[in-house]
Amino acid sequence: MLEFEKPIDALKRSIEKLEKIAQEKHLDYHERLTKLKERLAERKKTIFSGLSPWQRVELARCHGRPHTADYINALVENFVELHGDRSTGDDPAIIAGLGKVEGKNIVLVGHQKGKDTQENLARNFGMAHPEGYRKALRLMEMAERFHMPVVTLIDTPGAHPGLEAEEKGQARAIGENLMKIFSIRTPIICIIIGEGGSGGALGIGIADKILMLENSIYSVISPEGCAAILWKSQNAKEEAAKALKLTATDLLEMKIIDEIIPEPLGGAHQNPEETIKNLQGALKENLTKLNQIPLDHLLELRYEKYRKIGVFKE
């Protein structure tokens, strides 16, 4: 449980305890329960309408948020996962395959974290190796050949930072993706569903439309890493989170992303079904719009979109 969720949990426990007593002893606590529930709703609204950037970071990392596999199971019909980069091997940190959304064929690529410690170790906590990025590019090029739009789901602390990944060409793999995805002649939608960390996110993050869940984050570095470099202490992580402008609201204001997908009050982990439904609506709307744009013009808009990032007028 996150620290700022504890007052909410305390009220929930009080309500559950009172309901149990009322049921067991056949007492009428209706009025008191009504007041407690009103207080709970008010407390939740107050807390979650004023979250700090660091609290958004905690929600983005929160156990229980839907992962790529959850969205696939709920939204993608007849999904067929494809493996391997046709060079060195497969990377379980990235799921990639074909399926149907709203009756339309798509290619879906996404980072996959684990539900428990064992799966997290198997998935490398969603941190991809070079073969993961090469697999993603292979699927995107296949999508271009068969005229299928691409949907990428981003949820990673970053690319795998280990020696093995560097030996296999981590920087080159991400760099090639950045270069080649710009010329993929099919609509691409990127959705940040949790953490969007550094080059690990950018490796599959070039898109015509970039969407973010309300409590997800997207940044060049983690707050802890930023604090260690600039403040020489991870104790400054909250200050770093604020300075990085990594929240969906900040990024929409700077026109780095195109749309915020709302989450249920309390975060995606409180109601995964509603979160998935909200994402489904946003995905359907944006796929419809992008499919109406001629491909030559689509690529021009994609190029211009990224050229404008970081340009400011005073």
Image (cartoon, rainbow, N blue to C red):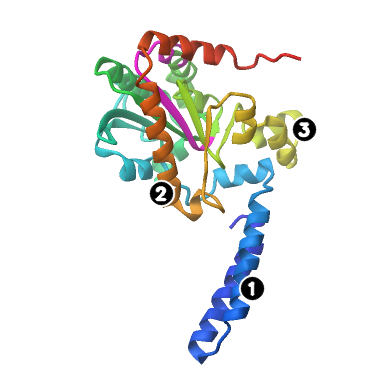
Q: Which residues are magenta?
A: 178-195
Q: Which mark is first along the chain, 2 or 3?
A: 2
Q: Which label sits in the foreground, 3 or 1?
A: 1
Residue hosting label 2: 118
Q: Nearer the viewer, residue 294 or 212?
A: 294
Residue 2 in view in this figure? yes
Q: Is residue 210 above or below residue 268?
A: above
Q: Secondary structure at mark 1?
A: helix
x and y percentages locating residue 69 in the rendered image: 36, 42
Q: CA distance from mark 1 to mark 2?
A: 43 Å
x and y percentages locating residue 217 in the rendered image: 58, 36
Residue at the spot 64% in from the left edge and 55% down from the top edge:
45
Q: Is residue 2 left or right of residue 282?
A: right
Q: Check the picture and name the quadrant holding the N terminus.
A: bottom right
| Residue type (three-letter) at the residue carrying disc 1 | Lys
Q: Is residue 24 left or right of residue 1?
A: left
Q: Nearer the viewer, residue 232 or 192?
A: 192
Residue hosting label 3: 231
Q: CA distance from mark 3 to mark 2?
A: 34 Å
Q: Which mark is first along the chain, 2 or 1?
A: 1
Q: Quadrant of residue 21?
A: bottom right
Q: Residues within 10 Å of mark 3 (few under 14, many from 20)?
A: some
x and y percentages locating residue 250 in the rendered image: 65, 32
Disc marking residue 35: 1
Say if mark 3 contacts mark 1, CB within 8 Å: no
